[in-house]
Image (spheres, rainbow, N blue to C red):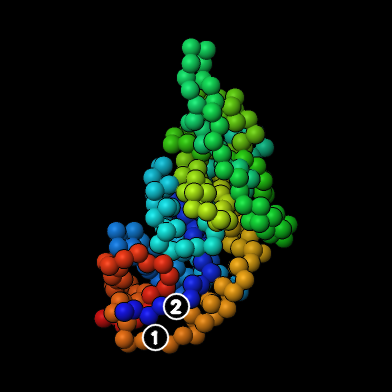
Amino acid sequence: MPETHPPVPAVLVLTTLAPEAAAVRAHIEDQEELVHRDGTRVERGRLPGTAWYLVLAELGEGTRTAALTTQLIEWLRPEAVLFVGVAAGLKDDITPGDVVVGTRVYGIHGGKWASDGFLARPESWPGSNALVQAARSAVRDMPGVRAHFKPVASGDVVPADVESEIVKHVRAHYNDAVAIEMEGSGAAHAAHLSGQLDTLVIQGIGDRANSDGSRNRAAAQAAAVAVEALRKHRPRAGSAESALSYRSRPRSPKSSEEGPHSPGNHIGLRHGTFHGPVIGKQR
């Protein structure tokens, strides 16, 4: 039987594409790759100066984030879930390089088309009060960041034109939303269904041309706010001590499963669901 260990305080950080993942990765140390038995890969590393381990996942675009987030939550048992991405601004005062901290995430496609037009049936998920407050506190000490604490609209569509029908739809039915993106609602919904998980969507604002430079800057700003918010946010009682115990615990040669690996190795998780760190022999 493999050894069992106390859980370490982990935050699952979800991203869409490589620029967002790279922006978060730049803040963590001692990365190791974990592989789910179904093939999903994540990177886990320490956030320096805190008790947190960040588990970074690059999920790709689209609403599939809900299913993958559910899988990752069941596997990794995090204390919080953050979605860090890049969105398009919907208001004139939301400009490229700004950061929107989602006080609420709207799923914009809920409704009914009737003879007199679209009848909205809103579905939304609030950001965790604890994380929203941590982010508010953090950005007060970040003079280089212009942050907005407002709702975010989320749907499986990319608006390339401020006069497009989807933008008009959002303005008509979700008028307080200041940014629009594709994946946040899936992540927020999955976190909500899992129970008492602190959850927050943080989006950097890119330009409408979605240029590489603009996307990279937006991702870097969003990642910086996420990290500084976590420096304010505290793990649950007892989990920080578990982290210290995990870091100081010697590896055992008797475990039947491989441990977290460096490039070129892998973790085999073929016989069950992984609910925490695995320590054991490396081949």
Using the image as rendered, state which of residue 15 and residue 195 is in the foreground: 195
Residue 232 lies in what quarter of the image?
A: bottom right
- The amino acid on which the numbered mark 1 sits, given as a three-letter code, is Arg
Disc 2 from disc 1: Cα separation: 11 Å
Q: Residues within 10 Å of mark 2 (few under 14, many from 20)?
A: some
Reply above or below: 216 against 167: below
Q: Which mark is residue 182?
A: none
The percent position of residue 92, horizontal first and vertical second, equals 65, 34
State left or right for residue 179 relative to residue 12: right
Using the image as rendered, state which of residue 144 and residue 75 is in the foreground: 75
Q: What secondary structure is marked by label 2? A: loop
Using the image as rendered, state which of residue 116 and residue 205 is in the foreground: 116
The percent position of residue 91, horizontal first and vertical second, equals 63, 34
Picture residue at 42% right of the left edge, 59% below the top: 74
State left or right for residue 134 relative to residue 153: right
The percent position of residue 206, horizontal first and vertical second, equals 54, 44
Q: What secondary structure is marked by label 1? A: loop
Q: In this view, which residue lies farthest toward the top?
A: 115
Residue located beneath label 2 in the image: 5
Picture residue at 49% right of the left edge, 49% below the top: 193
Assign the N terminus to one quadrant of the image: bottom left
Q: Is residue 268 among the parts visible in the rendering? A: yes
Which mark is nearer the camera, 2 or 1? Answer: 2
- The amino acid on which the numbered mark 2 sits, given as a three-letter code, is His
Reply above or below: 197 against 103: below
Residue located beneath label 1 in the image: 251
The percent position of residue 261, horizontal first and vertical second, equals 35, 74
Picture residue at 49% right of the left edge, 30% below the top: 110
Picture residue at 62% right of the left edge, 71% below the top: 237
Assign the C terminus to one quadrant of the image: bottom left
Dot placed on the residue nearer the N-terminal end, 2 or 1 = 2
